[in-house]
Amino acid sequence: MDNMKQQSVGRWISLLHRYGNVYMNEQLKEYNLGAGQYQFLAVLYDNEGLSQDEIAQQLKMDKGTAARAIAKLEKEGYVERKTFSVDKRIKKLYLTDKAHAFKSTLTSILSGWSSITTKDLSSEEHAFAMKLLNKMSINAENYLDNMK
Amino acid sequence: MDNMKQQSVGRWISLLHRYGNVYMNEQLKEYNLGAGQYQFLAVLYDNEGLSQDEIAQQLKMDKGTAARAIAKLEKEGYVERKTFSVDKRIKKLYLTDKAHAFKSTLTSILSGWSSITTKDLSSEEHAFAMKLLNKMSINAENYLDNMK
DNA sequence: AACATTCTGTTGTGTATGCAACTAATATTA
DNA sequence: TAATATTAGTTGCATACACAACAGAATGTT
């Protein structure tokens, strides 16, 4: 019975993550973006004006990773970093016109992958899957956050 | 309504993958292994004697990644690569005593993470989550495999 | 006010990974 | 059988990421 069955969870998560990245890289290539940037852009679409730290926290990513992802987004002309005199440490992030124009494209790309992976799930199954993944993420977060 | 909601799926998968790696790295550190190797070991526990290519295919990983992961497992004394005269290209993989002794430890570590992430799921929910993740993985595989 | 602490961001380093080019070995085919 | 194609594995290169050390700015403490 100890034939590594619980391995499966991690295996599927790993596969979905890796294949998702391959898909995103392919789709984003023509926009000079990669799988490492779109999540930051997605957060900004909902919350323009956040700082790098705030975005990193929302995504539960390392702030160094955020720094580099956002540098790339800036270099490619999707975001601008503005420092205000109130607190010169903070760089607030704003979307450019290019980013706004790109929003619907990103939305389609993301729902494309979502449709692919949940192709044969009923809408109840789909909703339930989301709920469970959400729970699992929260559990993972809580566990690791409590470690620190 | 287009507030990037379908983003969530990818976000949770990404988070579970990243946090899972952090957990695995931490747990495996004292065994001189990292998150990049244990999956290969797990496959071998069920199927000793596979070639690198066969393992890579089972895990849907790049053969280059497999080559490096297995080189590390060999270096740390968990596997041996043997070439037979039948086909000198193929390196069949065998577990060492050290690897066999490590099996139950890996099993506990893996079920540890599983318990953490599915902490508050009922066993029905847990089973259902597995089923859905499995379906999603298969869909992802089919999609990308058909691309090539 | 002076010093310590905390906070935001940057950067170096190491690992995990995919892709592509390459080598050596085997298989196919003209 | 010689020429060509396929296969298994290796390695260079690029990206995504975590962690840790660091710098400058802001806050708190005494």
Image (tube, coloured by chain):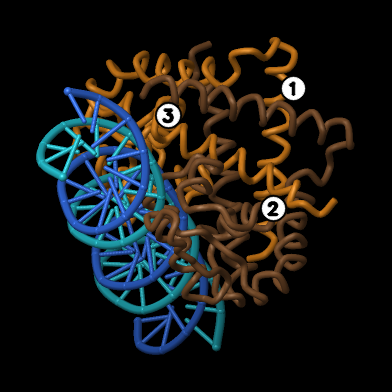
Chain colours: A brown, B orange, C cyan, D blue
Q: Residue at coordinates 62% horizontally, 67% vertically from top-left?
A: A95
Hey, what amino acid is under mark 1? Answer: Phe
- In the displayed structure, does residue B129 sit left or right of residue A6? right
Q: Quadrant of the C terminus of chain B?
A: bottom right
Q: What residue does disc 1 label?
A: B128
Q: Nearer the viewer, residue B50 or A40?
A: A40
* Host chain of mark 1: B
Disc 2 crowd, CA 10 A, few/some/many (<14, 14-19, 20+)? few
Q: Nearer the viewer, residue A61 or B51?
A: A61
x and y, in percent, of residue A39 in the image: 59, 54
Residue at 46%, 34% (x, y): give it: B19
- Mark 1 and mark 2: Cα distance apart in space: 31 Å
The answer, for residue B106, to whether it is visible in the render is: yes
Badge 3 vs badge 2, beta-carbon distance below 8 Å: no
Looking at the image, is C30 positioned above or below residue B97?
Answer: below
* Rendered view: A21 above or below A10: below
Mark-to-mark CA distance, 3 and 2: 41 Å
- Give the label on residue B42, or none: 3
Residue under pointer 2:
A46
Q: Residue at x 30, y 27 (%)?
A: B28
**Which secondary structure lies at badge 3?**
helix
Instruction: Give the mark nearest the N terminus, 3 or 1.
Output: 3
